[in-house]
Image (tube, rainbow, N blue to C red):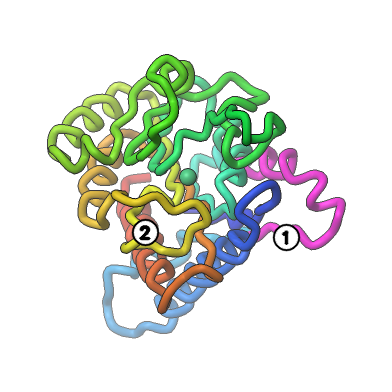
Amino acid sequence: MRTIVTVFPFDLFGSAGTGAGARLLGDAVNEILDDTEAETRPCRADVLRGKVRVKEHAFDTLAEVTDWRKRGRVAAKQAIKSGEFLVWLGGNHLAALPVLEELGTETLVVQFDAHLDVYAFHDTTTDLSHGNFLTHFDTPRPRFVNVGHRDLFLTPEEIGETFEAVYPAWDVAVDATRVATELRAKVKTAKRVWIDIDCDAFDPAALPAVHEPLPFGLSAPAFLTLFEAAWEGNVVGVSITEYDPGRDTRDTGLNLLGWLVEYVLLKAAERAP
Ligand SMILES: [Mn+2]
């Protein structure tokens, strides 16, 4: 099927610098497409030819910044309506909000994140931020399942207000196969599935380039086990946020995410239309 890659480098209200990460991943996609175009021998990436387009949004002017949420909603709505697979490269996690708002209640969002972004503590803002945006939907919320969190603050009651299930990193560490089995069962009952990846779901050793690192995160192979399980549902798109190249070491995060983006592009392109 065809894919639209939306670069949406919004990074206000938290994790400033992640906008550069979104743009860098967008550059990586363009490089993949250019390399494929230049290749003369048969390669797996041949399926990408003419099937992937990239749309980059800018946040250079005050008007563009002020209008960020509406612009995001319009872009997401058009992309979803087109029936194309959507890869959403956001700045901070808040940059995923417009697309999540457009998904509707029949979508199951499999959210890979170290955090459960519903925080309302004495030292957190009640205004919309990247730490509480799941409580700020303008539309009826999709269903949420978290994978890989390491939260040690929230009560099960608070978590249950937003998430229908959570699979914390300690459950994955004990038995990733069991988590994958449960996740697979869940996504197969959903009309459609969205995979939302906050980069801090990964262990900081695998992906150091984040603003709010938490230890004991997902290893890259464990992530892949769970990603594959989620992919067995009717996945309509993937969002990736919170990558800050300014905090990367020796391009560790860029390599991991660049590979992941290419992997997603190939899997989407090889799917029947
Ligand atoms: Mn997070």
SS at mark 1 in the image: loop
Q: Position of residue 21 (x, y in %)?
A: 55, 64
Of label 2 and label 1, which has the lower sequence position? 1
Badge 1 density bin: few <14, some 14–19, many ≥20, Cα 10 Å? some
**Is 72 contained in the magenta span?**
yes
SS at mark 2 in the image: loop
Image mark count? 2
Q: Which residue is more in the foreground, 60 or 158?
A: 158
Q: Is residue 106 visible?
A: no
What residue is pinned by disc 2? Answer: 204
**Looking at the figure, which quarter contains the C terminus?**
top left
Q: Position of residue 230 (x, y in %)?
A: 29, 38
Q: Is residue 135 above or below residue 131?
A: above
Name the residue: 35% across, 53% down. Answer: 202
Q: Of the residues shown, which amino acid type is indicated by label 2?
A: Pro
Q: Is residue 19 above or below residue 184?
A: below
User: With 41 as the anchor, is 52 left or right in this view?
Assistant: right
Report the predominant secondary structure element of the magenta stretch.
helix
**Spatial separation of the CA atoms under disc 2 and disc 1:** 29 Å
Q: Which residue is more in the foreground, 50 or 118?
A: 118
Name the residue: 66% across, 53% down. Answer: 11
Badge 2 density bin: few <14, some 14–19, many ≥20, Cα 10 Å? many
Q: Position of residue 77 (x, y in %)?
A: 62, 37
* Magenta stretch, residue numbers: 56-77
* Quarter of the image where one finds residue 151: top left
Q: Is residue 147 visible?
A: yes
User: With 135 as the anchor, is 109 left or right in this view?
Assistant: left
What residue is pinned by disc 1? Answer: 58
Q: Which mark is residue 140?
A: none
* Quarter of the image where one finds residue 79: top right
